[in-house]
């Protein structure tokens, strides 16, 4: 198919082969933009047929827009290194794209946490716009929490793709510091005001949202851990935001 896969990556040697192998017989090119891996990410990606480009990371939006700009096909599939297409979704894409009237598609993401398929906790059936025409799409959102937007008609694919987030605690905490720092920076860039109540009330509110309102308790021990870690991440993000405000104010 005239379809490009684009991906940004850093130190993803444990994940990237599974992701790329799930699509390499669907797409006509694989583009990986690496932001300074110190492991074997580049070598593994090359073995899977990827074209490798290097760019220093400044924001998720900029990094992904750069990766998309390298695609030679108009139709582009966007995946992270820990995401895998199901065979059913791959077949659906192959049958749909050649004759579609849409300009983009949301795909349904199913999440795994600590190796368990999460059926609640706000992690089941997430809709993500990941397949779109390059000429009509662009990422926005800044340094973190980027979002792909399409100027045109969008539809929804029926089948799912899989997100193997945090297979173990080491993996979670490897990403934890970076994501909480980026979250704090984004709040600062958006001129958000810090309130002590953010640190006091937001973490428990985040826990209750995931564990109670989104039925995380039905995901067992993993659901509890996911909600607790989310509350802790919220606490640390706002603590870092407070520290940034303090530094900026002298």
Image (cartoon, helix red, strand yellow):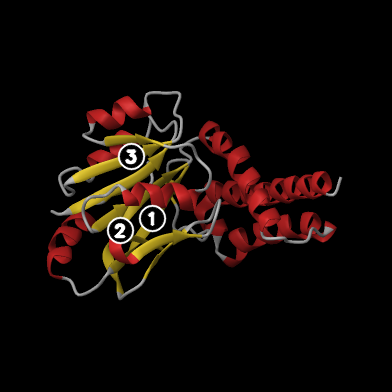
- Residue 83: x and y in percent read 36, 46
Marks 1 and 3, Cα distance to the nearest angstrom?
Answer: 23 Å
Whether residue 125 is visible, yes or no, is no
> Does residue 32 sit above or below 102 in this rendering?
above
- Residue 104: x and y in percent read 29, 67
Q: Nearer the viewer, residue 80 or 150?
A: 150
Mark 2 element type: strand
Q: Residue at left 47%, top 53%?
A: 61
Mark 2 or mark 1, earlier in chain: 1
- Residue 150: x and y in percent read 36, 68
Q: Which of 173 and 180 is in front in this view?
A: 180
Mark 3 element type: strand
Q: Residue at left 13%, top 63%?
A: 95
Q: In this view, does 21 lie to the left or right of 68?
A: left
Mark 2 or mark 3, earlier in chain: 3
Q: Which of 67 and 44 is in front in this view?
A: 67
Q: Residues within 10 Å of mark 1 (few under 14, many from 20)?
A: many
Give residue 101's quadrant in the image: bottom left
Q: Name the residue under label 1.
A: 110
Mark 1 element type: strand
- Residue 75: x and y in percent read 23, 59
Front tag of 2 and 3: 3
Q: Is residue 177 left or right of residue 94?
A: right
Marks 2 and 3, Cα distance to the nearest angstrom?
Answer: 22 Å
Q: Mark 3 points at which residue?
A: 32
Residue 192's disc is: none
């Amino acid at each position: 198919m005239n379809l490009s896969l684009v991906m940004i990556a850093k130190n993803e040697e444990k994940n990237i082969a599974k992701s790329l192998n799930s699509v390499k017989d669907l797409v006509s090119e694989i583009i990986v933009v690496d932001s300074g891996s110190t492991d074997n990410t580049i070598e593994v990606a090359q073995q899977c047929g990827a074209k490798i480009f290097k760019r220093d990371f400044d924001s998720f939006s900029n990094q992904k827009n750069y990766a998309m700009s390298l695609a030679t096909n108009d139709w582009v599939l966007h995946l992270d290194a820990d995401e895998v297409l199901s065979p059913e979704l791959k077949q659906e894409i192959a049958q749909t794209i050649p004759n579609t009237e849409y300009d983009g598609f949301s795909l349904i993401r199913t999440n795994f946490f600590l190796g368990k398929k999460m059926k609640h906790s706000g992690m089941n059936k997430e809709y993500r716009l990941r397949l779109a025409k390059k000429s009509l799409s662009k990422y926005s959102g800044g340094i973190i929490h980027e979002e792909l937007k399409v100027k045109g008609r969008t539809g929804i694919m029926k089948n799912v793709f899989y997100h193997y987030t945090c297979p173990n605690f080491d993996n979670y905490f490897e990403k934890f510091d970076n994501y909480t720092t980026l979250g704090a920076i984004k709040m600062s860039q958006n001129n958000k005001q810090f309130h002590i109540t953010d640190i006091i009330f937001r973490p428990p509110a985040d826990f209750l949202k995931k564990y109670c309102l989104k039925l995380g308790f039905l995901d067992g021990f993993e659901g509890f851990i996911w909600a607790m870690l989310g509350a802790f991440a919220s606490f640390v993000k706002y603590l870092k935001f407070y520290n940034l405000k303090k530094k900026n104010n002298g």
